[in-house]
Image (tube, rainbow, N blue to C red):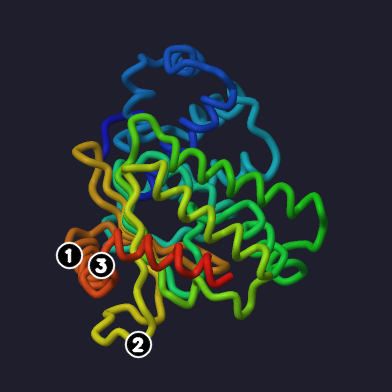
Amino acid sequence: MGQARQTMERRQLGLTLQRLRDQAAKSQQEAADAIGKVRSRIVQLENGTGTVSPDDLDCLLDFYGVTGAERETVLALGMEARKRQKRRTYTDFLPGAFQRLADLEDAAREIWSYDVRIIPGPLQSPNYVRETIESGDGIWWSASEGERESRQAFRLERQRRILQADPPKKLHFILTEDALLTNDRNAGVMREQLTHLVDLVEHHPNLTIQVLELGVAGNPAPNGALLVLEFGSSAPRVGVAPVVYGPSTYFYGEADTTALLRAFQKISELAMGPADSARFIRRKLEEN
């Protein structure tokens, strides 16, 4: 294991190993002792600025009690992280890509998110989450109660880590007006969701929510979502192209992430301001 240039693969491996270490209730010093290294090597690895040999990675996974498919995925991620490659984008084809995206969100200091026709995941109410999961039953995943409960628990935990982070993250979400309509949603679920949005705005001063009205001209991303994560001085900004299913694509070249942020800022200028958006959401709630 040694000092290395930070890449998306190394950042993902580091965040994954940090999460697994936390789940195993082990300290960085204990992890270092397990592979005969100094603590600073574990710090480098978890920060995405260190490489790890196959043998040391095996030892760490043994120490953390990681087995089965998850172990195979981490070993494959370790193989990718050892490659010397410089790319503008990285596509995560390995299993569990959504968990690794959640790890990046957890590490981010600022999150800018724009979604079309759906409430952004971190802002979804429990029943909205469940209804969204049920719509994919038998298509994207198995149609079983256990699968639904597992996916719902994961999404709600993702929300908790974003919304209740300490110190608080700077959060900015933009959603389109049609996400607030009940056309293809249960009316009771939408009432709960609208109430949830109102409560979030009232109780999270670090959270900005804007609504983009239908028919506004000049939208640079009318059919696609945007997600930009800012990590302060610890790591470069990351842009994400969210998908319903399949591999996630990450942009970490400065030109690309700057363009994505410009697009987000343009959409923010086109959307209603935060105060008007809050009043708009309350009006939709009254209409329901």
Residue 227: image x %, image y %?
36, 61
Reading the image, the residue beneath label 2 is 215
Q: Which mark is residue 255?
A: 1
Instruction: Tell me what residue is drawn at x 62 percent, y 44 percent.
Output: 72
Q: Give amino acid for label 2.
A: Gly
Q: Residues within 10 Å of mark 1 (few under 14, many from 20)?
A: few
Residue at disc 3, secondary structure: helix
Q: State the residue in front, 68 or 131.
A: 131
Which one is earlier in the sequence, the residue at label 1 or at label 3? Answer: 1
Residue 187: image x %, image y %?
66, 70
Instruction: Tell me what residue is drawn at x 36 percent, y 14 percent.
Output: 38
Give the residue at the far front of this rendering: 286
Q: Which mark is residue 268?
A: 3
Tag nearer the camera, 1 or 3: 3
Q: Residue 63, can we see it?
A: yes
> Quick check: 12 left or right of 286?
left
Give the residue at the far right of this rendering: 144
Instruction: Tell me what residue is drawn at x 37 percent, y 31 percent.
Output: 45
Q: Residue 7, can we see it?
A: no
Q: Which quadrant would the N terminus be assigned to in this image? A: top left
Tag nearer the camera, 2 or 1: 2
Image quadrant in which you'd find residue 210: bottom left
